[in-house]
Image (cartoon, rainbow, N blue to C red):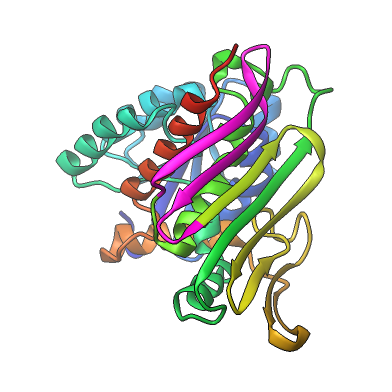
Amino acid sequence: MSGAIVNWGILGAAKFAREYMGPAIHAAKGARLVALATSNVEKAAGFQAFCPDLAVHDSYDALLADPRIDAVYVPLPNHLHVDWTLKALSAGKHVLCEKPITMQSAEFDALIAKRDATGLLAAEAYMIVHHPQWHLARELVQDGAIGDLVHVSGAFSFDNRADTGNIRNKADTGGGALRDIGVYTIGSARFVTRAEPDVVDASIRWEDGIDVFSDVRAQFPGFTYGAYVSIRAHLHQEMVFHGAKGLVRLTAPFNARVFGEARVELHRPGLELLVTRFPSVNQYELQVEAFGRSVLDGAAYPCPLEFSRGTQAMMDAAFAASPEG
């Protein structure tokens, strides 16, 4: 590594990488975007527009062989995540892989074993745990600001039925609502409460092998959970943590600044409302910087593979509770 800088490469010219993670890596402190792997010259140009010195490799293997690269970001389709994370670790690269990093919780065994054997950092790109709105929400709930937690509710939806070529609409690329956005409603509840479910149930609507609407319910120790996700419904997102003496509501919990301003509302007795706003936080940059601190300084990473495994296990249980057909 070059001084206190992590040199990054990106495997694949995904739209999300071009619009969000690529610029975040380029802008983050302690990070330098060095290379992209794609055989599509036109897609590479979109990255070079904000990072003119970006090198372009025509294959993923070529990027992994580049000795300048310390860490790789993997925004490939879901079904490719495990294989390319393992290949990158074997090539001596730290890995930040898009969610869901696996298709089933059992696949985490190989990832954790390779991470431990190489001594490298491998993590799921679960950006919301780096946003201060989520740290505030967890602090309020854990410190008893709303009394005993009674129920957690959430929703995350958008409608992409017209985009038939989208990987989210294809079963063979690991598409569907739960894998794409259910990780947020489920993982955020686990992050704030620091609890795991005892029982998981679900009602799922299937379409051509993918879940397009998933209503997941669970019993946690001391409280219940209910949240739905859909890729066939009007754009919406929120999370609510309802206690005996108040509630915490997040108005743009997942796509802060895109869906709207990130706000944490604390509702208290007497209809008192306290609002904390986070108008300019870029959670993607914070994610890259946290990754860099872990790589360079050995700081604990906020979203280890063990945490991500718990979210995947809850998704596995939801799928098992309402299988296709």
Residue at the location (58% across, 39% down)?
A: 216
Q: Is residue 228 above or below residue 58?
A: below
Q: What secondary structure prevails in the magenta region?
A: strand
Residue at the location (56% across, 43% down)?
A: 217
- Residue 252 position, x and y percent, is 71, 60
Q: Quadrant of residue 194?
A: bottom left
Q: Quadrant of residue 235?
A: top right
- Residue 120 position, x and y percent, is 25, 46
Q: Is residue 210 magenta?
A: yes
Residue at the location (44% across, 53% down)?
A: 220
User: In front: 139, or 119?
Assistant: 139
Work out which quarter of the rendered image holds the C terminus and state it.
top right
Q: How many marks?
A: 0
Give the residues drawn in magenta, as a range.
197-223
Q: Is residue 124 above or below residue 111?
A: below
Residue 150 appears in view = yes
Work out which quarter of the rendered image holds the N terminus and state it.
bottom left
| Residue 304 in the figure: left or right of residue 109 | right
User: In front: 307, or 213?
Assistant: 213
User: In front: 67, or 310?
Assistant: 310
Q: Is residue 117 above or below residue 297?
A: above
Q: Is residue 183 above or below residue 79?
A: below
Residue 33 appears in view = no
- Residue 71 position, x and y percent, is 38, 45
Residue at the location (30% across, 66% down)?
A: 299
| Residue 163 in the figure: left or right of residue 89 | right
Q: Quadrant of residue 86?
A: top left
- Residue 166 position, x and y percent, is 71, 23
